[in-house]
Amino acid sequence: MTKEDIANLEQAFGVRLPPDYVAFVTRYPHRLRSLKTDLGWKQESPADRELLGDAEKLRRINELVRIPGTPWTVGDGPWPEHYFVIGDDETGNYWCIDSRSASGHILFYDHDSGTFRKQCDN
């Protein structure tokens, strides 16, 4: 991913991504792309799912959660504009960055409860 890809994503979704995240994804470790977990029915790497390493996949997943009228939160509200999805677990749960925090808190969205909880500071 390039810095231009990041700038395009930031513009498209109205977020400012933390410098540490930008540095990581623009130099995405080859090991995370090549490491494959055998899920029985398929093999995938962290770059394919949990910590996306592709600008187009990031665009698609962030468009998906922002589809108008889709209830995400406890009160059936929309996806919070300042949360930028960085990965998912394929079962409706997401990891996202809170773009309002200076350090880029990482949150986990639990689809069963419709809640976000902080996973780590950055």
Image (cartoon, rainbow, N blue to C red):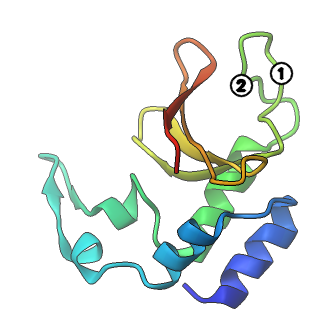
| Residue 84 falls left or right of residue 15 | left
- Are dots 2 and 1 in contact, CB under 8 Å? yes
Q: Mark 2 sits on what residue? A: 72
Residue at horizontal 86%, vertical 30%?
69
Q: Tag 2, which secondary structure? A: loop
Residue at coordinates 47% horizontally, 74% vertically from top-left? 24
Side of 16 relative to 36 (left or right): right
77 w.r.t. 55: above or below: above
Q: Disc 1 designates what residue?
A: 77
Q: Residue at x 39, y 41 (%)?
A: 89
79 to 102, vertically: above or below: above
Mark 2: which amino acid? Trp
Residue 3, percent across and down?
A: 66, 87
Q: CA distance from mark 2 to mark 1?
A: 6 Å
Instruction: Say whether residue 122 is left or right of residue 64.
Output: left
Locate residue 79: give its quadrant. Answer: top right
Task: Say which quarter of the image contains residue 72.
Answer: top right
